Image (cartoon, rainbow, N blue to C red):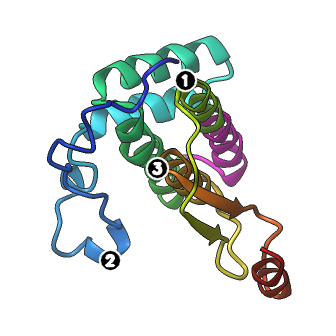
Amino acid sequence: MNRSTSEKSPQSPRPERLRLPERYASSVPPDRVHPGIPRARLQVLANAALDPDPVRFRRAAQRLLTQCRDAEQFLEEGISGTAMALGTWCEQDQIGLDAVARATERLEELVFEIADEYLSRSAAGGTARSILLTRAPGNHHTLGSFIAAELFNWHGWAVVSGPGIEGDRVIQTLASE
């Protein structure tokens, strides 16, 4: 995996942003949730994430990555769209929660791999802003927060995040940071 965020992206017009399907489901067609990637391509990666063969998953991820504008689009739309496809299949009882958990773990590992490659090639700069990212109380979904943390990091923010930062730990972390 080797698709860095384009150096031109800060100057180029920003693509339409990710929309949350549950909030916009009544007014936005599903193919506009991730406007740059056709739903069929996201489903291919979702199927590959479910496949026991890790090589098939890596090939599918590489194909989708090369079709994206840059690594940022791949994380924002490709990985999150793939997770949404998995969630939809689970809601429709086409796959079980255990399958979603295994596939999501693969997607999380992919996020970290791409982030590591990007950060190893980018110039280290001073961080002017910091952000604390945590999941909502009782929520066990972490993939979206991992993607958000990496993207903030790529854009120069100091990021404090993790699934263990909840409740009272948020207050303690804010006080110590």
Mark seen at residue 23: 2
Look at mark 1 in the image and give the residue it sits on: 121
Tell me the CA gap for discs 3 and 2: 27 Å
Q: Secondary structure at mark 2?
A: helix
Q: What residue sits 40% from the left and 36% below the top?
A: 74
Residue 88: x %, y % from top left: 45, 55
| Above or below, comparing residue 49 to residue 108 in the picture | above
What is the three-letter code of the residue carrying label 3? His
Mark 1 and mark 2 residues within 8 Å of each other at the beta carbon: no
Corner quadrant of residue 163: bottom right
Say whether residue 96 is magenta: yes
The part of the chain drawn in magenta is: 95-109
Q: What residue sits 51% from the left and 55% below the top?
A: 152
What is the three-letter code of the residue carrying label 2? Arg
Q: Secondary structure at mark 3?
A: loop
Q: What residue sits 29% from the left and 23% below the top?
A: 67
- Give 73 or 158, whichever is nearer the viewer: 158
Residue 94: x %, y % from top left: 52, 48
| Above or below, comparing residue 65 to residue 137 in the picture | above
Q: What residue sits 75% from the left and 61% below the top?
A: 162
